[in-house]
Image: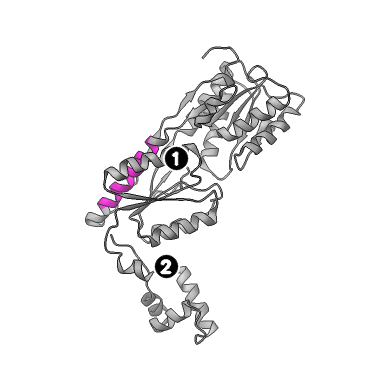
Amino acid sequence: MKYNQVTIKDIARELGISPSTVSRALKDHPDISPETKKAVNELAEKLNYTPNIVALSLRQSKTNTLGVIIPEIVHFFFSTVISGIEDVAYSAGYNVIITQSNESLLREKTDIKALFNSRVDGMLISLSRETSTFEHIDATLAKGVPMVFFDRVYDTPTSSKVVVDDLSGAKEATLHLIEQGCTRIAHLEGPPNLGITKQRLEGYIEALNESNIPVNKDIIMSCPLGTIEEGKSATEALLKMDNRPDAIFATNDPAAMGAMQAIKEAGLKIPQDIAVVGFSNWFFGALLEPPLTSVDQPGFEMGQEAAKLLIRQIEVKSKDNSEPVPETKLLKTRLIIRDSSLKKGKK
């Protein structure tokens, strides 16, 4: 398929110099003046020039390969998403290249460039928690690369996305705690720049408002990395309060696990003293003591839907070079109730 790839000739034409001069300037050749090197490199960056002679010679053909960027492969949720992507991709005759940003914006940028240079037909991306600017994505979209975002999405009207209903999932989790008789429910909040964090906070607040329970910002604790360590530290701070919480709703399961550690180390019982609910339903949450109540996300289905959207976009563009209308798929969550939240002893 065709990409809008900027060439050395384009840069040369824009600056009124020869392609060979541009080539040598990009290679920092000593015969080229500093002024010319500066002009060439600045224009190359502005035009999103990607030097890759081998790839350029092959741009006209499809590779039947999808590139995937996820924050963490070890994350159980993302591993199920990958399974869903592969299920659809392989059935449709596509191979899959998987990269992980390791929650780093720099790595995410590097992964996008690597996948582009590998001539993937399109990319499936879930943003890192550091990603708050999107120039690197816009630059790649401008080259005509089909992209579909999943879970942690770039909210652009030009690309399709697949998300779970985080707001409803968080609301259901909080209402469950209220039904158990909890009235002082703390929230461990995730990375502030991610849409999923905002949706889960909003769902928590909606549940409190509907139940006429005041929203207390003092017991909304920031866990920007969403780790076990942060969950534990935030909960230790909550437990030092004169009027400690009787329940905790965490933005993800690792933070909830950290909360459980802190509660146990303080000599308190779960859920009798403090109930705990997580989000994402990591498989080992059921192995904790007590087993962790959590909001289940349909990761496999998310991967399937994302792959279907991307392949459809690739096929339409390859056939007549037209752009399909972007779609947003909203998938439902499911609250898995276990012993960590059952104060009343019933589901």
Q: Who is closer to the viewer here, 310 or 57?
A: 57
In this view of the protein, can residue 331 be seen by the observer?
yes
* Dot in front, 2 or 1: 1
Q: Position of residue 200 (x, y in %)?
A: 54, 34
Q: Is residue 30 left or right of residue 157?
A: right
Please indicate whether residue 67 sits to the left or right of residue 179 in the image.
left
The furthest residue to the front? 287
Pick whichever, 4 or 344, lies toward us.
344
Q: CA distance from mark 2 to mark 1?
A: 31 Å
User: SS of the residue at dot 1?
Assistant: helix
Classify residue 254 by image quadrant.
Answer: top right
Q: Amino acid at mark 2?
A: Thr
Identify the amino acid type marked 1.
Ser
- Above or below, 29 against 240 in this view is below
In the rendered structure, does residue 230 fall within the stretch colored magenta? no
| Sooner in the amino-acid sequence: mark 2 or mark 1 | 2
Range of magenta residues: 301-316
Q: Is residue 211 above or below residue 63?
A: above
Q: Is residue 313 magenta?
A: yes
For disc 1, the neighbor class at 10 Å (few under 14, some 14 to 19, many from 20) is: some
Give the residue number, with chain letter if any, for mark 1.
79
Residue that extends furthest to the bottom in the rendered view of this protein: 31
Q: Please give the residue where the numbered disc 2 appears in the rendered image.
A: 50
Residue 333, percent from left and from top = 44, 29
Choose between 220 and 214: the one closer to the eye.
220
